[in-house]
C-alpha cells in the first residue's frame, strides 16, 4: 500500500537501516493491544505471511478466508488483509489478556509497527512513526531485533521484490484499462501467491522466487 506522506509530520525525521537503533521498544507491550484494534483493512498480508500462517496453523488459504482473513482492492490489486472482528474491531488472534496468540508467526506489518518503510530507487529504509504507539516509555532497540526475522537480508530483498512487483502490476493494469484482463490478472496473483499451497518443509524464499518469475512473465513485467 503506497501512501503520500510528509515524513516530517509523522516521523522523527530520520531514515534507518536494519542494524540501526531506534527508540521503538515498548517493554513487550505488557498487554497493551492498541495496535491490535480498530485497524480496519490496513494489516495487509504478503505471501510470506500466508506461508507462515498456513504451514504453522496447518490450514489452507481458503480456511483463513473463512475465519480471519478477507480480500480488498489495494492500489488496483486484490490482496488479503487480517479481518478485524467483534464489537471492538480487534484482531481475531488477540486473546482476553491482550496478547497475541500467534506472536511467533505474526504478520510482517505487526512485526514492523510502529515503524514504516520508505521506498526509493528500488530499495527501502525504515522510519519511526512517532504518533502511532501510545505505550511509554520507549527504549532503544536494533531494528533487526525488533523485526525478529531470521536472515533479515533475504527478507528485505523479498519485501522489495513484492512491493515493486505490485507497483509494476498496478501500472500495467492502469495502462490496459480493460476490466476483464485486470480481473484475470488479479485472479492469477491470488492463485499464484496465496491460494496455491506452500511446502512448509522447503525454504519460502526459493518458492517465492519461482512464483515471482512466472508471475512477471504472465503480467508482462520485464526484468
Image (tube, rainbow, N blue to C red):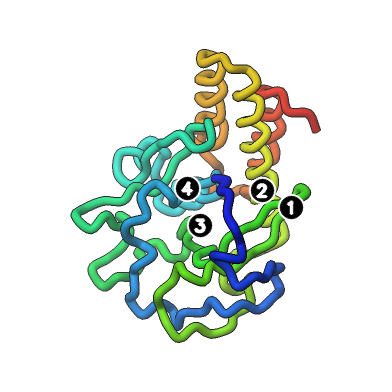
In the picture, the quarter occupied by the N terminus is: top right
Q: Name the residue under label 3.
A: 109
- Please identify the quarter of the rendering in which residue 93 is found: bottom left
Seen in the image, is 130 located left or right of residue 38? right
Q: Which of marks 4 and 2 is in front?
A: 4
Q: In this orientation, which residue lies closer to the viewer: 60 or 85?
A: 85
Q: Is residue 110 above or below residue 47?
A: below
- Whether label 4 touches label 1, CB < 8 Å: no
Q: Is mark 4 on a helix, strand or loop?
A: loop
Percent coordinates x, y for residue 97 in the rendering: 26, 73
- Whether label 4 touches label 3, CB < 8 Å: yes
Q: Which mark is residue 199?
A: none
Mark 4 / mark 1, whichever is N-terminal: 4
Q: Which mark is residue 205?
A: 2
Seen in the image, is 27 located left or right of residue 157? left
Q: Which mark is residue 123?
A: 1
Mark 2 / mark 3, whichever is N-terminal: 3
Amino acid at each position: 500500500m503506497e501512501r503520500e506522506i510528509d515524513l516530517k509530520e509523522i516521523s522523527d525525521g530520520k531514515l534507518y537501516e536494519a542494524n540501526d537503533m531506534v527508540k521503538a521498544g515498548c517493554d513487550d507491550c505488557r498487554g497493551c493491544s492498541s495496535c491490535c484494534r480498530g485497524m480496519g483493512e490496513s494489516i495487509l498480508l504478503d505471501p510470506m505471511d500466508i506461508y507462515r500462517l498456513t504451514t504453522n496453523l496447518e490450514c489452507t488459504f481458503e480456511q483463513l478466508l473463512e475465519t480471519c482473513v478477507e480480500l480488498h482492492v489495494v492500489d488496483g490489486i486484490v490482496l488479503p488483509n487480517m479481518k478485524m472482528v467483534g464489537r471492538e474491531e480487534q484482531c481475531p488472534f488477540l486473546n482476553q489478556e491482550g496478547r497475541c496468540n500467534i506472536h511467533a508467526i505474526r504478520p510482517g506489518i505487526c512485526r514492523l509497527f510502529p515503524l514504516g518503510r520508505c521506498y526509493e530507487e528500488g530499495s527501502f529504509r525504515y522510519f519511526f512513526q512517532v504518533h502511532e504507539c501510545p505505550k511509554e516509555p520507549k527504549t532503544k532497540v536494533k531494528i533487526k531485533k525488533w523485526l525478529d526475522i531470521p536472515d533479515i537480508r533475504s527478507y528485505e530483498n523479498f519485501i522489495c521484490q513484492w512491493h515493486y512487483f505490485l507497483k509494476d502490476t498496478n501500472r500495467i493494469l492502469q495502462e490496459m484499462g480493460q476490466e476483464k484482463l485486470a480481473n484475470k490478472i488479479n485472479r492469477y496473483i491470488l492463485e499464484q501467491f496465496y491460494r496455491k499451497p506452500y511446502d512448509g518443509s522447503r525454504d519460502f524464499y526459493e518458492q517465492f522466487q519461482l512464483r515471482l518469475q512466472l508471475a512477471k512473465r504472465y503480467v508482462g513485467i520485464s526484468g
